[in-house]
Image (tube, rainbow, N blue to C red):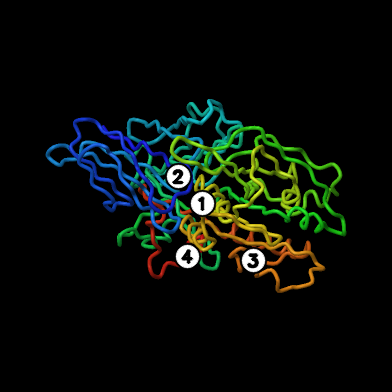
């Protein structure tokens, strides 16, 4: 009946044309942006100019087709400036004659037809051994209590999918509950249960039911600007610098992000302690994103693609090793778009509704050719509940200690890194932020930015 032909592949601000495909029986179309009427169309060509505003923010674009009586005949929806997964999974529950879930099966779709290489299933926060996703038994459910099933699938090419199902109690009659994830930090780091959070989360003035609170994995994206590799390589422990290797890429990238699918192994020349320095655990997923892009031309627009590394595990090395590698991908521009890259990193970090953080690593006075401003990007990451850490790498013998503020491209909050001890302290703060974060799951499917914390709630949003 109606489709939105314009596909917003990149981050969008300001006025943009929107083109629709509309059935001949449709008498009119209302275009809505975040629920507010943006344009009314009554005849072909079914096109309109929609203003997405001067600041970067998540949006929902909705096209509503109307018949001759003014009744709704069809809808089409597209998310803009929101994380979009490369893979999706769904849980289906099997019930006994009394309606209680006794088994589950998981189906998935990916951009490439493949089976997962890693599977993690939790039931009420505890690991659940699953031999076959096509059908697996659920633990016997005591009484009428609430239960939360979560499945994480990891595919080759650094692609992942995550899905959840809530049932029991109020959700006994639902095959799967529609849920919204809100990352928060509780006051004084105190652990909380869903029952403790009644009335804490509000949407349009109405309290929202909390169905689960979890810690789960964490996503860390490091945006590494030019110069960081050289300075960080001199910060090794006990006077040992790190050797450098090359992480290569031959595959293509999408309009807003890409991947470097095959990485180099550990660098043989590096001191072993330095190689493992500042390594993250198995639940903390570290990647590096370069602030250099390449153009991808489409019929109606040109998009810039940024490249993100595969997950860096302790098998390859720690954070210090990651900062010193020479990441390579063909066709990248020699110029940097630092603010734009931080925005893309924030969107990538928010994928999967996990604990998250973005680190911007700067080192020298370099021109930033970004379309977006640093202030706009900081606000966007706050909206996505993504904490931002800015590190400025400066050699120990730098003559002017106060010079960094003039070269940080609008990032005056940067923490100076001039020694391994400085870097260790910065990583400690990063880890503390991640450790304090929890993901609160609310009943219902909403835009996370529409959720507010009620007055008196002993928590704050993770991105603040």
Label 4 or label 2, whichever comes before in sequence order: 2
- Height in image: 163 above or below 202? above
Give the left or right position of residue 432, taking residue 177 as reference: right
Say what secondary structure mark 1 lies in.
strand
Q: Where does label 1 land, which residue? A: 214
User: 32 or 301: nearer the eye?
Assistant: 301
Q: Nearer the viewer, mark 4 or mark 3?
A: 3
- The residue where tag 4 is placed is 459
**Disc 4 vs disc 1: Cβ atoms closer than 8 Å?**
no
Q: CA distance from mark 4 to mark 2?
A: 22 Å
In primary-sequence order, the first of circles 4 and 3 is 3
Tell me the crowding category of disc 1: few under 14, some 14 to 19, or many 20 or more residues within 10 angstroms, Cα based: many
Instruction: Identify residue for label 2.
Output: 148
- Looking at the picture, does residue 186 appear above or below residue 342? below
Label 2 with label 3: CB-CB less than 8 Å? no
| Residue bearing the label numbered 3 | 414
The Cα–Cα distance between marks 4 and 3, rounded to whole angstroms, is 25 Å
What's the residue at 23%, 39% (across, down)? 65
Q: Earlier in the sequence, mark 2 or mark 3?
A: 2
Asked if the residue at tag 2 contacts the one at tag 1, i.e. Cβ–Cβ closer than 8 Å, the answer is: yes
């Amino acid at each position: 009946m109606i489709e939105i032909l314009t596909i917003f592949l990149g981050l969008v601000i300001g006025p943009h044309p929107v083109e629709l495909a509309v059935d001949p029986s449709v008498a009119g179309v209302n275009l809505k942006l975040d629920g507010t009427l943006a344009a009314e169309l009554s005849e072909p060509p079914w096109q309109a100019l929609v203003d997405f505003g001067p600041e970067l923010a998540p949006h929902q674009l909705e096209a509503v087709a109307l018949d001759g009586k003014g009744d709704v005949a069809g809808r089409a929806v597209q998310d803009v400036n929101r994380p979009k997964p490369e893979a999706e999974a769904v849980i289906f529950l099997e019930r006994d004659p009394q309606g209680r879930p006794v088994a589950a099966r998981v189906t998935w779709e990916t951009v490439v037809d493949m089976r997962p290489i890693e599977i993690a299933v939790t039931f009420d926060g505890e690991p659940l051994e699953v031999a076959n996703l096509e059908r697996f038994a659920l633990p016997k459910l005591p009484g009428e209590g609430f239960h939360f099933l979560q499945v994480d699938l990891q595919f080759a090419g650094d692609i992942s999918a995550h899905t959840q199902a809530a049932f029991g109690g109020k959700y006994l009659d639902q095959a799967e509950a529609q849920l919204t994830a809100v990352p928060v930090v509780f006051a004084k780091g105190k652990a909380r249960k869903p029952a403790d959070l009644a009335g804490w989360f509000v949407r349009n003035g109405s309290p929202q039911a909390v169905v689960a609170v979890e810690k789960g994995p964490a996503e860390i994206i490091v945006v590494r600007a030019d110069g960081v590799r050289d300075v960080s390589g001199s910060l090794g422990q006990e006077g040992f610098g790190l050797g450098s290797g090359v992480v290569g890429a031959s595959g293509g990238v999408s309009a807003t992000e890409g991947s470097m699918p095959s990485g180099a192994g550990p660098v043989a020349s590096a001191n072993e302690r330095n190689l493992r320095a500042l390594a993250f655990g198995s639940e903390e997923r570290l990647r590096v994103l370069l602030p250099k892009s390449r153009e991808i031309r489409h019929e109606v627009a040109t998009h810039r693609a940024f490249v993100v590394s595969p997950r860096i595990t302790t098998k390859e090395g720690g954070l210090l090793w990651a900062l010193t590698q020479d990441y390579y991908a063909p066709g990248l521009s020699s110029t940097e778009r630092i603010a734009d890259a931080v925005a893309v990193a924030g969107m990538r970090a928010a994928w999967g509704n996990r604990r998250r953080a973005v680190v911007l690593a700067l080192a020298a006075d370099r021109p930033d050719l970004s379309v977006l401003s640093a202030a706009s990007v900081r606000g966007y990451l706050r909206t996505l509940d993504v904490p931002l850490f800015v590190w400025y790498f400066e050699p120990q013998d730098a003559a002017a200690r106060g010079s960094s503020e003039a070269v940080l491209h609008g990032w005056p909050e940067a923490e100076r890194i001039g020694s391994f001890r400085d870097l260790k302290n910065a990583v400690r703060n990063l880890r503390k932020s991640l450790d304090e974060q929890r993901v609160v799951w609310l009943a219902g499917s909403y835009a996370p930015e529409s959720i507010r914390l009620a007055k008196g709630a002993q928590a704050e949003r993770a991105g603040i």
